[in-house]
Image (cartoon, coloured by chain):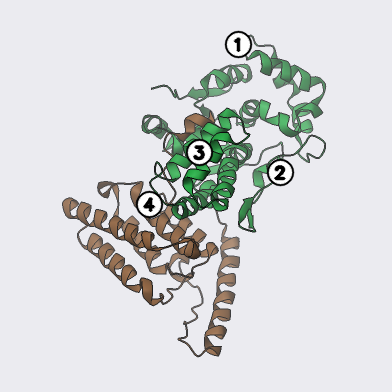
């Protein structure tokens, strides 16, 4: 569990990192990422969305479109099921394009897949879908392990399980 | 602690998350309760499940093929018990060998980094009086592998286990004289009552269940799936116990 004191330190670290990125981007004359001082919720402010490299932008756009459909059709359990499976498939397609060279990106996508694999469409609640959407918005190719850890904690807090299912393994640890 | 609070042992903490579905259903009875555990359970998880995961990770990142990892694990010089555990984890994280090595590595990484967070997400931790430094060790990732100090020899152990044993001497005597206690445990307790230092280092795991029971507040219910070991200890200490059967 992260204490509020530690969260404060984390927030400061993120801001410092972002300033460094900002400086590098300025030097290279590229697009500047706005620096947003964290104010409200950690989910919304700690990791600002970063422009994805072109090769995965399309995949991510499709995934976000799919989760949007899932949100819009949440009240219809049958359609919810359909979009739920579509979302899983889209995430799996993206996963298959990634390698260990993008290990943190791959880990983030696998976390989202595991979150969906460990539940069922009919058991999902709206808050979990929103959380998943906000997490997906923050995933990008150059995400670091520290940011992935935060996203993992956000997913766990919402009741999702972004780890591989180890059902039955407890019998080996008696 | 309020009435009806649940004090969880390591087996329950692991089974809640990684147990078979029918066991998870039975464990749901603790969900509405305030859940507590001693930090000693964290040490037990670090030295078992987490250690297995860290070991497996090093195998996976070293090899370029999942089949090689499975074959190596079959012959690796570890105990059969440990081998079975590691193979079971490997089967799970590779979805029965259907996933790529890269997926297995990143999924295992999520398990290693998120294990404590998911297992203890709603459990209030009480600092163990044994002051076990292994309970609060942080995992580090250096040079592509995860590391965490997971074992201390008796000579270098900095915990307060000796003091803990001395403070609980009377309770330990009560446990050791019971006939329904496992013979080996009973003999070991008799030994440590005479020479508490013996319990330090690797030996402390032998009295893990006893430590957990001693640390449970009197007004809480101790929950465990390890009924045969916990029941007599709780009886000796007059602690309230609820056992959850693992059998089908």
Q: Secondary structure at mark 4?
A: helix
For the question of whether residue B8 can be seen, the reply is: no
B243 shown above or below B51? above
Q: Nearer the viewer, residue A40 or B84?
A: B84
For the question of whether residue B87 can be seen, the reply is: yes
> Circle 1 sits on which residue?
B180
Residue at figure coordinates x 30%, y 50% from the top left: A124
Q: Secondary structure at mark 2?
A: helix
Chain represented in green? B
Q: Secondary structure at mark 3?
A: strand
Same chain letter for marks 2 and 3? yes
Mark 1 or mark 3, whichever is nearer to me: 1
Chain where mark 1 sits? B
Q: CA distance from mark 4 to mark 2?
A: 32 Å
Mark 4 or mark 3, whichever is nearer to me: 4
Q: Quadrant of residue A168?
A: top left
Residue at figure coordinates x 78%, y 19% from the top left: B191
Chain where mark 4 sits? A
> Circle 2 sits on which residue?
B133
* Comes first in the chain, label 1 or label 3: 3
Same chain letter for marks 4 and 3? no
Answer with left or right where residue A159 lies relative to residue A13: left
Residue at figure coordinates x 52%, y 21% from the top left: B227
> Circle 4 sits on which residue?
A115
A38 shown above or below A107? below
Q: CA distance from mark 1 to mark 2?
A: 32 Å
* Comes first in the chain, label 1 or label 2: 2
Chain where mark 2 sits? B
């Amino acid at each position: 569990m992260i204490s509020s004191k530690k969260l404060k330190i984390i927030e400061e670290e993120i801001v410092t990192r972002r300033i460094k990125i900002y400086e590098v981007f300025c030097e290279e004359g590229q697009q500047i990422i706005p620096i947003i001082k964290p104010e409200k919720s950690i989910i919304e402010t700690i990791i600002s969305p970063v422009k994805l490299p072109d090769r995965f932008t399309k995949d991510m756009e499709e995934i976000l479109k799919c989760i949007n459909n899932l949100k819009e059709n949440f009240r219809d359990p049958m359609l919810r099921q359909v979009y739920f499976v579509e979302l899983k498939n889209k995430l799996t397609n993206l996963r298959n394009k990634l390698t260990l060279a993008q290990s943190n990106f791959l880990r983030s996508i696998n976390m989202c897949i595991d979150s969906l694999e460990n539940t069922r469409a009919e058991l999902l609640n709206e808050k979990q879908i929103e959380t998943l959407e906000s997490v997906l918005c923050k995933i990008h190719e150059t995400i670091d392990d520290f940011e992935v850890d935060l996203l993992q904690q956000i997913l766990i807090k919402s009741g999702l399980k972004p780890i591989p299912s180890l059902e039955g393994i407890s019998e080996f640890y008696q | 602690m309020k009435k009806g609070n649940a004090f969880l042992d390591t087996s329950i903490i692991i089974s809640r998350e990684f147990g078979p579905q029918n066991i998870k259903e039975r464990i749901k009875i603790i969900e509405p309760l305030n859940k507590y555990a001693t930090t000693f359970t964290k040490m037990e998880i670090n030295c078992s499940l987490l250690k297995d995961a860290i070991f497996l990770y090093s195998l996976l990142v070293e090899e370029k093929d999942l089949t090689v990892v499975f074959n190596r694990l079959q012959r690796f010089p570890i105990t059969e018990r440990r081998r079975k555990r590691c193979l079971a984890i490997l089967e799970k994280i590779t979805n029965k060998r259907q996933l790529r090595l890269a997926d297995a590595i990143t999924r295992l990484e999520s398990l290693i980094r998120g294990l404590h967070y998911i297992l203890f997400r709603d459990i209030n931790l009480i600092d163990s009086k044994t002051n076990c430094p292994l309970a609060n060790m942080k995992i580090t990732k250096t040079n592509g592998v995860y590391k965490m100090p997971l074992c201390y020899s008796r000579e270098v152990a900095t915990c307060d286990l000796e003091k803990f044993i001395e403070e609980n001497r009377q309770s330990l005597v009560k446990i050791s004289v019971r006939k329904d206690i496992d013979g080996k445990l009973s003999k070991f307790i008799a030994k440590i009552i005479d020479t508490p230092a013996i319990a330090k280092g690797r030996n402390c795991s032998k009295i893990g269940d006893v430590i957990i029971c001693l640390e449970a507040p009197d007004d809480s219910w101790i929950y465990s799936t390890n009924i045969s070991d916990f029941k007599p200890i709780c009886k000796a200490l007059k602690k309230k116990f609820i056992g959850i059967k693992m059998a089908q």
